[in-house]
Image (tube, grey):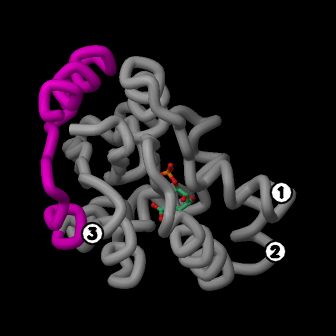
Amino acid sequence: MKNNYNIVLIGFMGSGKTTIGNILGKKLNKNFIDTDQLIEKSANTNIAQIFDKFGEKYFRNLERDLIFSLKNISGSVISTGGGTFCNEQNINILKSIGKIIYLRTSYKCLISRFTNEEILKRPLLSDLKKLNNLLVEREKYYLQADYCILTDNKTTQNISDQIIKLF
Ligand code: S3P
């Protein structure tokens, strides 16, 4: 396979998309793109502020526009936000530009990963009680990925190596 293919990482908050995306970008000599970082850059503020000032719907529109702008991208590892792959339009675009890898992590393991700092950065973590429901609701989207990699009790190196073997 030529090196111009894209790899798209999806999964719940805390599943390791950004960390693993970074490692994969370096190991595969690909450009690394983090969609949340691009949204923050173009909005000139952080995600917590966007949610706080304008609400989730506004953020989802920015997210949808950003995904649309990636339509012609190649040779990249793209790490998405936890809700990005839960929208049909985003799913279609992301599927058309690359192979989708779902980093699947159990609720128990996710919860153990969230530090106070992580919680502050992610508005949807403010109500931890709703999190398990959200995870269950989102699985039907996440499971439309081309590959599913279980991440519980694995190191980031181990997960990245497993993904590299797929290509
Ligand atoms: C969200 C996940 C976040 C970020 C935003 C919304 C979600 O990204 O896009 O806070 O809906 O799950 P991470 O998955 O990188 O935390």
92 lies above or below 166:
below
Q: Mark 3 vs mark 2: which is more N-terminal? A: 2
Mark 3 near ligand 1 (CB under 8 Å)?
Answer: yes
Return the residue at label 1.
45
* Residue 158 drawn in magenta: yes
Q: Residues within 10 Å of mark 2 (few under 14, many from 20)?
A: few
Q: Position of residue 152 (x, y in %)?
A: 19, 30
Query: Which amino acid does the dot numbered 2 rest on?
Result: Lys
User: Bounds of the magenta span?
Assistant: 140-167
Q: Residues within 10 Å of mark 3 (few under 14, many from 20)?
A: some
Task: Give the residue at the far front of this rendering.
Answer: 2
Disc 1/disc 3 C-alpha distance (Å): 27 Å
Label 2 close to label 1 by CB (< 8 Å): yes
Return the residue at label 3.
138
Classify the position of the N terminus by image quarter. Answer: top left
| Residue visible at 28% across and 24% down in the picture | 160
Classify the position of the C terminus by image quarter. Answer: top left
Query: Which amino acid does the dot numbered 3 rest on?
Result: Arg
Q: Mark 1 vs mark 3: which is more N-terminal? A: 1
Q: Mark 2 vs mark 1: which is more N-terminal? A: 1
Q: Nearer the viewer, residue 86 or 125?
A: 86
Q: Secondary structure at mark 2?
A: helix
Q: Which mark is residue 53?
A: 2
Q: Secondary structure at mark 3?
A: helix
Q: Nearer the viewer, mark 2 or mark 1?
A: 1
Label 3 close to label 2 by CB (< 8 Å): no
Left or right: 43, with 113 as reference point: right
Q: Position of residue 163 (x, y in %)?
A: 21, 31
* Residue 32 drawn in magenta: no
42 lies above or below 23:
below
Disc 3/disc 2 C-alpha distance (Å): 25 Å
Count of numbered tags: 3
